[in-house]
Image: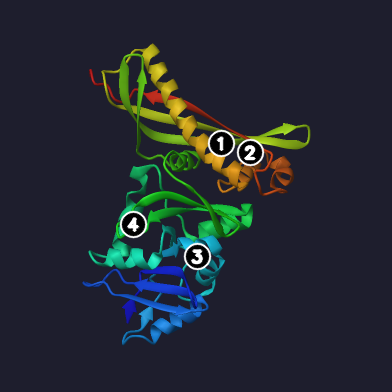
Amino acid sequence: MELIRTLGVDVAPAGVKITASGGDQEETRVVTGEADTISAAVLALQGGGDSYLYFGHVTQLLVGEALAGEGLSPALDYTLRDVEMRLETALYLVQGDAENAIREAAEEGSATERLEALAADAGLTAASMPRTVKDVLADLDRQGASFVPAVTGDGELSAAGYGILKGDALAGWAQGEAALGVNLIFSKVDADVVTVTAGETTAALRVVGAETGVRPLWDGESLTGLAVTCRVEANLAEGAPMPDEETLAALAAALEEVEESRMERALALAASLDADYLGLRPAAALAVPWRKSALLEEKGMAGLELTARAEATIQRSYHADG
């Protein structure tokens, strides 16, 4: 028996191509199979070697960019229904082909090892967070859109922001500042460092916490917009000794400007794609449950004004002057 840890799915002339890779062997073996469905491709893999391939230990599912453009439903449905697969499987979108990425990673280790390291370091990047098949299925059912962590299509499998799903298909990418904005909106900023300047003082601020809320805006009974407010806490990581109150307030204002810009980029994607991939409507419904039906009767962002505001506090936990 050979334990499969990473599974890749790509478009193929026959329909779909499956790439399977282990992560516990001294030498990583990569096998592929093609068929008109994922289930048939998996069966084709079983007949191609002298070991039984066991998929009950799959921890990562990689979907190639071309297949994601056509729709993730077959891959998600297979994970949901197959007796060996698990809904807790981590899901990634590959910028390129999943097969190439898995094969290149196997040359110096395995895709499994690289993705496990990426998930472990997600809190240090502030621009990526792990998501499971279960998370994405729940989003698509609730709000008709979702987002999935993206990785580069080379053997490095580095974090590349997020792929945005509208329906079940890839509709766009949240990268760079927009990806940081996604994490802010979800309060996932365990170790972000922002350099800001106030007057003659430049400081590196370590963002150590964020709490985000969504408030609906109304014109009578009509929903006109959604306002996102994020309360950010930061520590002075580098720079001059603890500034005076006036300088501290100016640094906090500069941090607010940076964080607001990041969230605005993430919100702009929701507006341009008409996709509530951030779950703003359900979040707003939690704030005003008595108007839940009005907030959830639509799933898109068309015609809504989306605004972002950051409120920053710089904690006095680090005193360089003792």
> Sequence order check: which comes first, mark 4 or mark 3?
3
Left/right placement of residue 223 relative to residue 62 reads right
Amino acid bearing label 2: Ala
Amino acid bearing label 1: Gly
- Report the Cα–Cα distance between label 4 and label 1: 33 Å
The residue identified by callout 3 is: 67
Residues marked 1 and 2 touching at CB (< 8 Å): yes
For the residue pair 34 and 165, the one nearer the viewer reads as 34
Q: In the structure shown, which secondary structural element does the residue marked by tag 1 occupy?
A: strand
Amino acid bearing label 3: Leu
> Sequence order check: which comes first, mark 4 or mark 2?
4
- Report the Cα–Cα distance between label 4 and label 3: 18 Å
- Disc 3 packing (10 Å; few <14; some 14–19; many ≥20): many
- Looking at the figure, which quarter contains the N terminus? bottom left
> Sequence order check: which comes first, mark 3 or mark 2?
3
Badge nearest the viewer, 3 or 2: 3
Residues marked 3 and 2 touching at CB (< 8 Å): no
For the residue pair 76 and 168, the one nearer the viewer reads as 168
Residues marked 4 and 2 touching at CB (< 8 Å): no
The residue identified by callout 4 is: 157
Image vertical order of residue 255 relative to residue 296, above or below: above
**Residue 280 position in % (x across, y down):** 60, 43
Any mark on residue 213, and which? 1
Any mark on residue 149, and which? none
